[in-house]
Amino acid sequence: MGRAFVYVILGGGVAAGYVALEFARRGGYSRGELCIISEEAVAPYERPALSKGYLLPEGAARLPGFHTCVGANDELLTPKWYKEQGIELILGTKVISADVRRKALVTAVGETISYKTLIIATGARALKLEEFGIQGSDAENICYLRNIHDADKLVNAMKSCSGGNAVVIGGGYIGMECAAALVTNKIRVTMVFPEKHCMARLFTPRIAEYYENYYTSKGVTFVKGTVLTSFEKDATGKVTAVILKDGKRLPADMVVVGIGIRANTSLFEGQLVVSMVNDGIKVNGQMQTSESSVYAVGDVAAFPIKLFDGDVRRLEHVDSARRTARHAVSAILEPAKTRDINYLPFFYSRVFTLSWQFYGDNVGEVVHFGEFTNSSPRFGAYWVNKGRITGAFLEGGSREEYEAISVAVGRKTKVTDMAELGKQGLAFAVQE
Ligand code: FDA
Ligand code: NAD
């Protein structure tokens, strides 16, 4: 049993959707030559909606409304679109083994799917508490959040918990965005994480303090610098409390866990070169892996960032998934015309009425600026390394202001006087 395609996109998430659109735009295939194989039962969608619009108590986002590529203000790719474009969607199908030498994949039902060119877009999976030695996180009221199936479980848990208590484990993106969604759904939230402050991978203590105070004003309690050790459950197996390392007991009607991700690389272990630094599949500036017929894009790919002197990074953000996807198609169809990717890392988040953007790399000395107020926040920070702007963060900016900070980072604007930079703040980038 088997099928053969010219191009196979393995994975059906954000990057897969953007790969498909780029192929369709460039007309680089004939009907039936291109397929997407996805473990998920639905066509590619904009994953960021799952921790935002999908969790709203009213007017929540639902498919088909947020299939790719609406997140980039582009076409909505419904299953009908794929049909019209002659792109085969092989959904609800997990690939369980890959042989890059033979150019073949095997699915869970035993089908062999062969390709001439493979685009790996397998993304990542949520880390489980069991991987940290904590048992029992499969309870019906403990929620992870990576796919639409998880999001439905979370929505159901929130519905049966209105007015109750939630414990959020992890102070990263999922923790922060889900805590805001829980509050909006009238659920009391306690956040537990091991670091000194939230969003420790990106925020400075000062930036974190602002968001923590804002969340506190919305009724969120922070328990920092500690981890959980176990769950208390009732006779039906539902969690009733979270037990912390210091013995403290937090009553819980539901739990949300966001403790990071692991790139889905295991199918290719021992076959493709993996980046030592951050466990992604290593690619060159054309998104090509160590095997010339195999490309990797999105969360799973570790690629060189020119702006960081070619440093190889695996980014876990949607803009990177979209850009690397489009770049790979360009490299596949027009290799001679495609220069190495020149990507400026871009992260963002929206919680309550707040909204921030970050560009670049958060290394070097930090200079904060602006108004850290609740009524009309408009503040940020620059990271300055070796006399140049390497990163910039802005909360509450306008489109032009975000554009200005991105340009300052992209140009690695020179900084001669740190005190002056702090004084000028946003104006430094805007006047550039
Ligand atoms: P993605 O995870 O989207 O897709 C991977 C696909 O591969 C899935 O369909 C999976 O089922 C499939 N797959 C994996 N292994 C397979 C196998 N063996 N066989 C078949 N299929 C397989 N970023 C940001 O910049 N701003 C934001 O606001 C957010 N918000 C956000 C919210 C939530 C809830 C999450 C989980 C993530 C975000 N992100 C984000 C991150 C962003 O969504 C992420 O970077 C992209 O989804 C990455 O796209 P990929 O296509 O690489 O992976
Ligand atoms: P994360 O890496 O942002 O945060 C992980 C957090 O887990 C850490 O901040 C830490 O507080 C906590 N942690 C780690 N080990 C722990 C332990 N043993 N016990 C308790 N807490 C522990 O990851 P995430 O929040 O799970 O997000 C998952 C992925 O989704 C990331 O790739 C992220 O980029 C993506 N995402 C992005 C956005 C966005 O860009 N706006 C939004 C949602 C999700």
Image: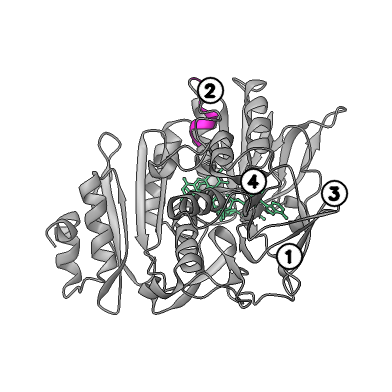
Q: Earlier in the sequence, mark 1 or mark 3?
A: 3
- Numbered circle sitting on residue 186: 2
Q: Nearer the viewer, mark 2 or mark 1?
A: 1
Tell me if label 1 and label 3 are in contact, CB under 8 Å: no
Q: Residue at x 73, y 71 (%)?
A: 269
Depicted 143 relative to depicted 309: above or below: above
Mark pair 3, 4: CA separation: 18 Å
**Upstream in sequence: badge 2 or badge 1:** 2
Instruction: For marks 3 and 2, give the CA distance.
Output: 43 Å
Mark 3 surroundings: few (<14), some (14-19) or many (≥20) residues within 10 A: few
**How many numbered marks does the figure carry?**
4
Tag in front: 3 or 4:
4
Q: Nearer the viewer, residue 334 or 56?
A: 334
User: How far apart, in angstroms, are the residues tagged by discs 1 and 3?
Assistant: 19 Å
Viewer-closest of 411 and 84 = 84
User: Mark 3 = which residue?
Assistant: 109
Q: Which mark is residue 266?
A: 1
Query: The C terminus lies in which quarter of the figure?
Result: bottom left
- Circle 1: residue type: Ser
Left-right relation of 163 to 355: right
Mark 4: amino acid: Glu
Q: Quadrant of residue 423?
A: bottom left
Query: Are the two marked residues, 3 and 4, in contact with CB atoms closer than 8 angstroms?
Result: no
Mark positioned earlier in the residue sequence (4 or 2):
4
What residue sits 36% from the left and 38% below the top? 354
Q: Range of the magenta residues?
A: 52-58
Name the front one of labels 1 and 3. Answer: 3
Residue identified by numbered label 4 = 88
Disc 3 under 8 Å from ligand 1? The reply is no
